[in-house]
Image (cartoon, grey):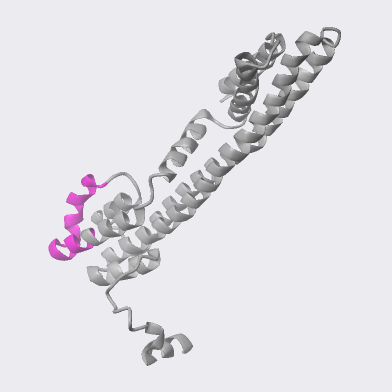
């Protein structure tokens, strides 16, 4: 981590040195490159100063995953119900053969715990701890993106101030003022755009993904415990779909549970 900090600090100093030395006389490609180097390079270096590169890389992996999670609850419920049917047909020990076919994650952990004959309380504890660990990683990723959203406008302001200083040093040469003013304004523009149209929307997308995945982990915990209890797969599927907010046709839509006397007594009693 210390090596990363030193390299990031050196790169940040090089970016500012290069920005001070780069000659920009007109509004064009060179002025845009100068502004982008300050904003994007400065934001990346500042983030690397604060967080390990592995966590930054993981954060963007979570962002990518957040765009691919539309059908995740359905797949999770289908997988859990399939495991429940297999366990009722062949016994809990048969799950040992299913474990290797599952992707890495909470479902595989839960199936392994059942296959290795952990008791119900231990299974619940391990699943909850792993879910909390995963959610804490999501929170770190969200914090990193939010930090980048705050740093980007600051880097844009730094680029503006830097080029205003250079502009005042060339006050006797009006021909050079246009280029420095262009970079000064472009730096602020890119900083604001990158923060408000880039990092903040990604933050919101990641937060939505975090909430969805928290629900998914609750569904997995409930489903794994139902498999351990040998609950009927159809009843288990109905319960998990209701927990996920997915419409199910187990009970006819015309009949509302809230209208039945027995359900009303359970609610009121």
Is there any visible trace of residue 142 in the rendered image?
no
The answer to which image quadrant residue 120 occupies is: bottom left
Magenta stretch: includes residue 226:
no
Is there any visible trace of residue 56 in the rendered image?
yes
Left or right for 218, reference 110: right
Magenta stretch: includes residue 93:
yes
Q: Nearer the viewer, residue 240 or 220?
A: 240
The answer to which image quadrant residue 30 occupies is: top right
Q: Quadrant of the N terminus?
A: top right
Q: Nearer the viewer, residue 95 or 147?
A: 147
Q: Nearer the viewer, residue 201 or 132?
A: 201
Residue at 70% from the left image edge and 8% from the top image edge: 21
Give x and y (percent) for residue 134: 45, 47
Q: Nearer the viewer, residue 124 or 20?
A: 20
The residue most toward the left is: 90
Give x and y (percent) for residue 159: 71, 23
The answer to which image quadrant residue 77 occupies is: bottom left
Residue at 28% from the left image edge and 73% from the top image edge: 249
Left or right for 35, reference 57: right
In magenta, the rendered stretch is 83-102
**105 over 39 or under it: above or below:** below
Give x and y (percent) for residue 235: 27, 72
Q: What's the magenta bit mostly, secondary-structure-wise?
A: helix
Residue at 26% from the left image edge and 64% from the top image edge: 227
Residue at 39% from the left image edge and 54% from the top image edge: 126
């Amino acid at each position: 981590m210390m090596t990363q900090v030193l390299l990031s600090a050196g790169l940040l100093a090089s970016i500012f040195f290069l920005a001070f030395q780069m000659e920009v006389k007109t509004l064009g490609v060179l002025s845009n490159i100068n502004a982008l180097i300050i904003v994007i390079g400065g934001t990346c270096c500042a983030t690397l100063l604060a967080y390990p590169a592995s966590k930054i890389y993981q954060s963007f992996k979570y962002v990518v995953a957040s765009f691919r999670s539309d059908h995740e609850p359905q797949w999770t419920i289908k997988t859990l119900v399939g495991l429940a049917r297999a366990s009722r047909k062949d016994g809990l020990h048969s799950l040992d053969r299913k474990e290797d076919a599952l992707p890495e994650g909470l479902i595989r952990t839960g199936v392994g715990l059942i296959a290795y004959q952990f008791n119900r309380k231990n299974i619940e504890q391990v699943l909850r701890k792993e879910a909390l660990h995963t959610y804490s990683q999501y929170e770190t990723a969200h914090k990193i993106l939010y930090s980048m959203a705050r740093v980007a406008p600051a880097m844009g302001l730094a680029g503006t101030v830097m080029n205003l200083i250079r502009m005042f040093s060339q006050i006797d040469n009006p021909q050079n003022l246009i280029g420095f003013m262009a970079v000064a304004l472009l730096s602020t523009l890119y900083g604001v755009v990158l923060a408000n149209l880039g990092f903040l929307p990604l933050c919101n997308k990641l937060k939505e993904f975090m909430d969805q995945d928290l629900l998914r982990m609750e569904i997995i915990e409930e489903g794994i415990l139902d498999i351990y209890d040998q609950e009927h797969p159809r009843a288990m599927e109905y319960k998990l779909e209701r927990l996920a907010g997915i419409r199910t046709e187990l009970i006819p839509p015309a009949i509302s549970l809230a209208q039945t006397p027995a359900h009303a007594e359970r609610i009121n009693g």
